[in-house]
Image (cartoon, rainbow, N blue to C red):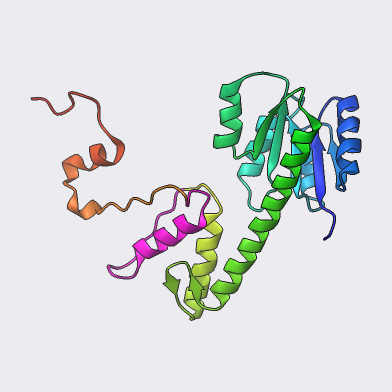
Amino acid sequence: MARRNVLIVEDNGDQREALAITIGQWGYDVETASDGQEAIQKLGTFPVHVVVTDLAMPRLDGIGLLRWMNERQDMPPAIVMTAYHDMNKAVTVVHELGAFWFLEKPFNPDALRVLVARAADFRSLRLEKECLERRLAYSGVLGEMVGYSPAMQRLFGLVQQVASTSVSVLITGESGTGKEIVAQTIHQLSARKDGPFMAVNCAALPESLMESELFGFEKGSFTG
């Protein structure tokens, strides 16, 4: 197996060097950056399998780095370290910004070793999954969709592209062309695939109630 690359992002020089030595001894190739801005430059120059980043840093902190990574495709998983014991921030970086895990300093090196290995495996499995999906698409099958024409191949590529992001998607087309199947396939290929897929027939909702049905309403809104 080829050696995997780990990018350490830490503004404290002593801690950065110590982490680089430790992770290198575990069999990884290590690159370092002193803040999020330098990390972005290095993410664009060579393949990275795992990012290990501090949270509080000058110029661009860990939150800014995670936001930048979250807006782009094919970014490696990130393990976040911090000396601040703030569980609300931990929830934010893991669930909202897509970090792989959150570690409070000081931490046990064995815990970091396990997390780096799991994150690297996760990265490899994700790349293998994407490769398999591309092969299936080329064979004319993607999720619930089947098609061999150039138009369907372009649709498969577009579905795979948007499924890897968190953007909202508007699907248009004539009745019976499979808009709901496209939506289901996007959901199945997305990071939200383990959550429910809710299909709503907007045509069956009265115009006066559509907003409240989709977005909710405050108590007392419909009293006379």
Q: Residue 131: x, y in percent? A: 64, 66
Residue 56 falls in image quadrant: top right
Residue at (11, 25) in percent of width and height: 223
Question: Relative to 101, is 29 above or below?
Answer: below
Q: How many marks?
A: 0
Is residue 40 among what the camera can see?
A: yes
Q: Residue 184: x, y in percent? A: 40, 59
Residue 64 falls in image quadrant: top right
Residue at (31, 53) in percent of width and height: 199
Furthest toward the top, the residue is 85
Question: Relative to 189, is 140 above or below?
Answer: below
Q: Is residue 183 left or right of residue 112?
A: left
Per the rendered image, the range of residues in magenta is 168-193
Residue 82 falls in image quadrant: top right
Residue at (27, 34) in percent of width and height: 216
Q: Residue 113: x, y in percent? A: 78, 39
Q: Is residue 186 left or right of residue 1?
A: left
Please check the rendered image and state whether residue 179 is part of the magenta-colored stretch, yes or no: yes
Is residue 36 among what the camera can see?
A: no
Furthest toward the front, the residue is 110
Q: Residue 112: x, y in percent? A: 76, 35
Quarter of the image for the N terminus: give it.
bottom right
- In terms of depth relative to the viewer, which is nearer, 211 or 132? 132
Question: Relative to 147, is 209 above or below?
Answer: above
